[in-house]
Image (cartoon, grey):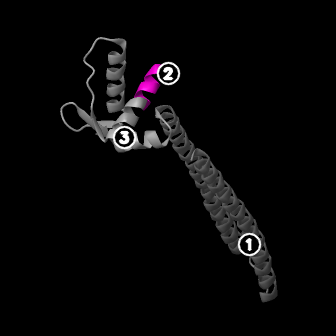
């Protein structure tokens, strides 16, 4: 629903009047255009929880009404609400994507670790060294291979950490941009 300029102005006047006078009776039972506009403004303010009934025909500002005045009017308030909602959706999407990536990487690392373990077990059982020296050499080769694999894992983990830091910076900048 698009708010027309007259309605926006009337809502701003209504909120300002209630803010200045603390609580105000709002009577608009006439059939004139201005009375109909005031009634529509009142109903819209009640629907958006900007005002609340204090008594039968008197209204006072709700917390959201004060925020609307502080934001510079109903139009700015609604724009800020829309931006906040968009920011929340963006943060949720980025978080979801990040978690999905981390899950995939972790799954790959677990599977790779299992494969390395199986290969190591197969190699150690398949190779029957003739002497202790050959056995020690084989062990040194396996340790060297494991060290290289471990180094690759550390590099991948470091890249993941930098991606997470980058995402956190993006989220912070989006939060700061909305304020």
Q: Name the residue under label 1.
A: 146
Residue at the spot x=19%, y=36% of the render? 55
Mark 1 / mark 3, whichever is N-terminal: 3
The magenta-colored residue range is 5-12
Which picture quadrant has residue 126? bottom right
Residues at marks 1 and 3, CA–CA distance in whole angstroms: 74 Å
Residue closest to the far left: 56
In the rendered image, residue 42 lying in the magenta stretch gets the answer no
Q: Nearer the viewer, residue 166 or 105?
A: 166
Location of mark 3 (residue): 20
Helix, strand or loop at label 2? It is helix
- Residue in view at x 52 percent, y 44 percent: 88
Can you name the residue that lies furthest to the front here?
21
Label annotation for residue 5: 2
Residue 158 in view, yes or no: yes
Place of residue 132 in the rendered image (x, y in percent of width and height, measured from the top left): 77, 88
Q: How many marks?
A: 3
Residue 109, above or below 4? below
In the depicted structure, whether residue 179 falls above or below residue 28: below
Numbered disc 1: secondary structure: helix
- Within 10 Å of disc 2 (Cα), the crowding (few <14, some 14-19, many 20+) is few
Name the N-terminal-most of marks 3 and 2: 2
In this rendered view, identify the residue nearer to me: 31 or 90.
31
Q: Where is residue 28 in the image (x, y as percent from the top left)?
A: 28, 21
């Amino acid at each position: 629903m698009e708010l027309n300029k007259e309605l926006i102005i009337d809502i701003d006047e209504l909120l300002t009047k209630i803010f200045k006078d603390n609580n105000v009776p709002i009577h608009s039972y006439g059939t004139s255009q201005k009375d109909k506009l005031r009634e529509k403004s009142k109903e819209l303010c009640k629907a958006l929880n900007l005002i609340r009934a204090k008594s039968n025909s008197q209204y006072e500002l709700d917390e959201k009404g004060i925020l609307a005045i502080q934001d510079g009017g109903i139009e700015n308030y609604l724009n800020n609400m829309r931006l906040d909602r968009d920011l929340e959706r963006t943060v949720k999407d980025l978080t979801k994507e990040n978690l999905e990536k981390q899950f995939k990487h972790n799954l790959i690392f677990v599977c790779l670790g299992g494969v390395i373990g199986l290969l190591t077990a197969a190699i150690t059982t398949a190779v029957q060294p003739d002497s202790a020296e050959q056995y020690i050499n084989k062990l040194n080769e396996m340790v060297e291979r494991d060290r290289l694999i471990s180094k690759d894992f550390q590099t991948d983990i470091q890249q993941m950490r930098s991606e997470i830091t980058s995402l956190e910076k993006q989220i912070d900048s989006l939060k700061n941009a909305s304020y």
